[in-house]
Image (cartoon, coloured by chain):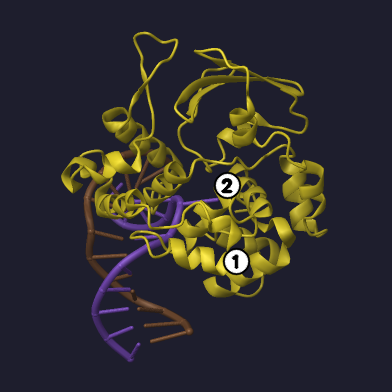
Chain colours: A yellow, B purple, C brown
Amino acid sequence: MPARDYDLAATLDSGQTFRWHSTGNGWEGIIRNKWVRLVQSGDQIQATTCTPHSNWSWLEDYLQSSSDFDGIIASFPDDEPMQRAVRACRGLRLLKQDCWQCLGSFILSSTKQILQIRRVVATFSERFGDAIPSPHSNLPSYSFPSAETVASLTETELRACGMGFRAPYLLGAAQRVADGALAIDRLNTMSLQAARETVMTLPGVGRKIADCFLLFTGAQPCAFPVDVWITKALQRLYFPTQNKTLKQLQQFGETHFGPNAGYAQQYLFHYMRVHRRDSIN
DNA sequence: CTCCAGGCGCCTT
DNA sequence: AAGGCGCATGGA
C-alpha cells in the first residue's frame, strides 16, 4: 500500500504500542488476531499475512496510512520547538489501536520503562493469549489476551507475569470491560472531558493513562498525555525559566497545539526520546 | 550501591 | 485543591 511520509520504524517503535518485533528489514506483529509482517521500501509498505486477504481495510485502518497527514502537520502551531520536533522525524504517525489491548497495555505501563512494558506484555500474551498462526512453525505467536480471558484469571497469575502492583488494576479493569457497561465504543462521540471521566472510573486509570488510551485508539485527537518526558519537553522548550505545575502543563498542552494536539504530543515525546543523550538534557 | 521508569490511589494539609 | 508517599520490578 502507498505510504508517503510514513516512517514505519519510528511509528512502531515510538512507545504508543508494545508488541512489534523488528526482524532487521521489517516488522512482525499481530493486528486483530492476524499475524502480519510489514516491510517498508520508500513510499510503500508491503504486508505479508498467513492467509489470503482480498480486503486490507483492517490494516489501513490500523496504520492510518490514508489519513490527512499534511493537514495534521499543518495544524500544529508554527513555533520553533514544534517545527523542530517535526523536522526531527517527519513521518512519525499515530496508529489506531484496538481498545482493550491499548487500555491494558497502558495500565501496565505506569512507572515502567518502555522496554519493561514490552517484556511484561510479551510474557502476559505468551502465557494467556490465543495461539495465532504464523510462518514460524517453531515460534508460535500469541494475541494480547482478551478482557474476558483476563477477567477469568487471578491476581496471582497476573503478578507471575511481572506486573507487580499493576496486576489488580488490570484484573479490575478487565472485569469492567468484559461486563460491557463502559460504553467503550462511544468514547469518540463524547467530549474529551466526558470521555476522560468515563475511562478514569476504571481501576489503575488516571489522567495520563486515560489520555493515552483515548489518543492511541483514535477516539479523542485532542487528548494530550503528560508524562515525565512531556513534562521535561514542555518545560525546556516552552517554559525554560519558570516551573509550571502538572495541571498547568496539561492545560497548555490541550490548548496550544490545536485540533491534533495529541499528534503534536507524540512528536514532542519522540523528539525527547531521540535526544535524551544530547545536550538538550 | 542509588536513582528512576510513558502513574495511580490514598492519605495528609 | 495541592502535595507526599507507597507500591513491584528491573534497567541504567
Which residue lies at the image location 62% right of the left edge and 17% below the top edge?
A54
* Residue A229 visible here: no
Chain of the residue that carries numbered disc 1 in the rendered image: A
Chain of the residue that carries numbered disc 2 in the rendered image: A
User: Hey, what amino acid is under mark 1?
Assistant: Ser
User: Which type of secondary structure does the marked residue at label 2 adopt?
Assistant: loop
Picture coordinates of residue A40, whole percent (x, y): 67, 21
Which residue lies at the image location 35% right of the left edge and 38% below the top edge?
A146
Which residue lies at the image location 79% right of the left edge and 55% below the top edge?
A75
The image quadrant of residue A191 is: bottom right
Q: Which residue is mark 2?
A: A276
Disc 2 packing (10 Å; few <14; some 14–19; many ≥20): few
The image quadrant of residue A245 is: bottom right
Q: Is residue A248 left or right of residue A20?
A: right
Q: Is residue A183 left or right of residue A5?
A: left
Which residue lies at the image location 37% right of the left edge and 60% below the top edge?
A202
Q: Is residue A198 left or right of residue A69?
A: left
Q: CA distance from mark 1 to mark 2?
A: 34 Å
Q: Which residue is mark 1?
A: A191
